[in-house]
Image (spheres, rainbow, N blue to C red):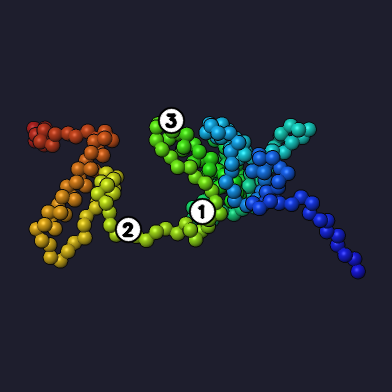
Amino acid sequence: MSMQYQPSNLIEMNANGTNPFLNRMDSARAAGAIMAYEFKNIKPKKQLKEIIQILKPEMKTFLKFPYKFKYNIKDRCVVCGTHKIWDGNDAMRPPLPLHKVRKGYPMRGTYCEKHAAIHRQYEMLEQQILAEEHGLSFSAYIPSAKSLNPVNLVSSAPLTTLKQGDIQSLSALGWTIKPPQMSEISKEEELFRLLIESEANSSRMKALLTEGVVVTDVDADATTETEES
């Protein structure tokens, strides 16, 4: 009876499933569990260049010269080659990878869960840089297995109350917000309803004027049509 020889694993993995003998860049590009990438640089723009190098598609090389994408195949991660089929309704489904990450033509492959989380970290870093350029505050995204768990992505219960700011923002977008109709309405409740509708109409008119809608004189148009007839 022959027994199959299984060599011992001399290269052990650390707690987060990465090879401790790999450098920072190779460890982030290798297949593994979801992780938050820790930047080497401190400045955000240098961090952006660093994370773009991680998300670049893996290349085939001949005599150290790259000549072709290695994992440009459907349902394969373009970085590490992990097979991944994303559900269309998955909230963490990444966009189509570009061959230069920020620009270029779309690849046939995708990102695995690990590199999809790093890509989300890259998107948040871009938003952070944009916010800092305009003097705004922005909280950075830190990917974790808990944030990618479908159980934690269930939407909350329907809203039953709206604040005044919510009513104004929704009305400015064209929504019609009305309070619930009661069987018996007092004068105070009717006044409250009219105030809400008036505020909503005012917000919508301001939004239309901001978008550049030209207001014409209705009486002048009616007089012109009468003279022509």
Pointer 3 and pointer 2: residues touching (CB < 8 Å)?
no
Residue occupying image coordinates x 27% and y 54%: 162
Q: Which of 152 and 97 is in front in this view?
A: 152
* First in sequence: mark 3 vs mark 2: 3
Seen in the image, is 2 located left or right of residue 127? right
Residue under numbered circle 3:
133
* Quadrant (top left/top right/bottom left/bottom right) for the N terminus: bottom right
Residue 216, how many percent across, how many down?
A: 17, 34
Q: Which numbered tag is attached to residue 147?
A: 1
Q: Which numbered tag is attached to residue 68?
A: none
Question: What kind of residue is marked 1?
Answer: Ser
CA gap between label 1 and label 2 equals 23 Å
Residue occupying image coordinates x 14% and y 34%: 217
CA gap between label 3 and label 1 equals 28 Å
* First in sequence: mark 1 vs mark 2: 1
Residue under numbered circle 2:
159
Question: What kind of residue is marked 2?
Answer: Leu
Residue 134, how many percent across, how many down?
A: 40, 31
Q: In this rendering, does residue 100 appear at all?
A: no
Circle 2 Cα neighbour tier, 10 Å, few/some/many (<14 / 14–19 / ≥20): few
- Counting labels gives 3
* First in sequence: mark 3 vs mark 1: 3
Question: What kind of residue is marked 3?
Answer: Glu
